[in-house]
Image: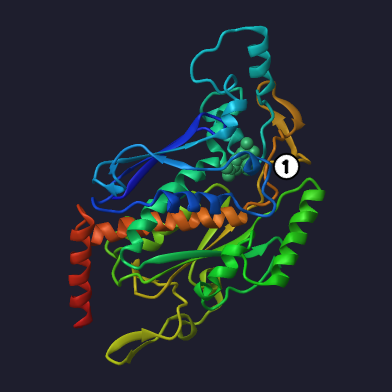
Amino acid sequence: MIFRFLTSGESHGKCLNAIIEGVPSGVKLDIEFLNKELARRQIGYGRGGRMQVENDRVQILSGVRHGISTGAPIALMIENKDWDNWQIPMSVLPVEQTEENIKLINDKKIKNVRPGHADYAGALKYNHTDIRNILERSSARETASRVAVGAVAKTILKDFDIEGLSCVTQIGEAKADLPSDIFELKEKIESSDLRTFDDALYENMKKEIDKAKENGDTLGGKFTVVFKNLPVGLGSFVHWDRKLDGLIAQAVMSIPAVKSVEIGIGSKAAQTLGHDMHDEIYIENGKYIRKTNNSGGIEGGMTNGEDIIVSAVMKAIPTMKKPLNSVAIDKKESVQAHFERSDTCAVAACSVVAEAMIAIVLADAMMEKFSHDSISEMKSDYENYLKRIAER
Ligand code: EPS
């Protein structure tokens, strides 16, 4: 991996951070673009109260001078506004054991695990009796850092005209087929707080969310991310850990609550005959073209020049107002699961996070293919490669 990153930070800690290694020098970073990406993640009908508290903004702390990357690691920080309300229970340093502080800390302790979340296995694995120690880091709030990193990856990809977009195709029972070209519907998708493309579908999705909310329940859905203008030959067939579809699947599956990832027609491939499955190749004006894209832009673990199409399913969020039967991990008692403010549905946000994760994988694949110490070197290597393959 060349474009690498780590994140740190707790949901109600002081801030979320990321350190990115491998950004070429000479990349022009627009902080407003990074902030816009963060705002896209915050939107979504059915999201909870936290999104009213936060207005995610990123600060770049290193690796950039006068808006241009130097090639050094880039550190990013997003402050949690909610930290103001959590300074004592989430203090990094030991706090004075006053009656008031002890109460503040005890009030935020959690014993009752939420089925479906990281609580149960996390508490046993890391030997905690206060599940807050698990909840804080396993919270999907961490994905704000990933979106900031993804915005840096997208900036690199933009230099090569590579662009991505996501849309939501299903929430609960409300669903529609993926339109043939989602980029044509970009404005509509970006203006929809469910990132969808059809008015009737939008209304049905809202009804599904409202119904779940009334019942103290949550619900998931399905989304698709498309990236276009990829050169042929990113990734490789020669080793399992160099296959681009495998890398994308891992990156998207690592997003909290994602339960399945599909490339191209995905699970429909199970019932599709070979003649209908594979995208025939034609020659038009001296160029190789396809009329279908069932393989979702990846063959043999490599890009084939067609759009990359990735769909994923997000399960219903496990934090629910009407809780499930569960256990208290300190006393081994049967209880109701813990409830804390949460989202009813966050599929639209999840699709923005998936865009970011795929952008990260693609930026890394571009760097693996082309020299990458500086963006100008990367561009000239890329141009030479395009020239070479155009002659074939
Ligand atoms: C989230 C912030 C969190 C949750 C949500 C995602 O904030 P809080 O816990 O203060 O409400 O709303 O996380 C989950 C639902 C989860 O289960 O992890 C965010 O910024 O996206």
Drawn side of residue 64 relative to residue 54, left or right = left
Specify few, some or many for label 1: CA neighbours under 10 Å numbering under 14, 14-19, or 20 or more: many
Residue position for label 1:
320
Q: Nearer the viewer, residue 208 or 117?
A: 208
Q: Which quarter is ligand 1 in?
A: top right
Q: Residue at x 36, y 60 (%)?
A: 362
x 75%, y 40%: residue:
324
The residue that appears at 77% across and 49% down in the rendered structure is 213
Residue 222 in view in this figure:
yes
- Of all residues, the one furthest to the right in this rendering is 214
- Image location of residue 232, percent across then percent down: 30, 72
Residue type pointed to by label 1: Met
Q: Position of residue 85 (x, y in %)?
A: 62, 26
Secondary structure under tag 1 reads loop
Residue 173 appearing in the image: no
* In the rendered image, the vertical position of residue 27 relative to residue 318, given as above or below: below
For image coordinates 56% across by 27% down, the residue present is 133
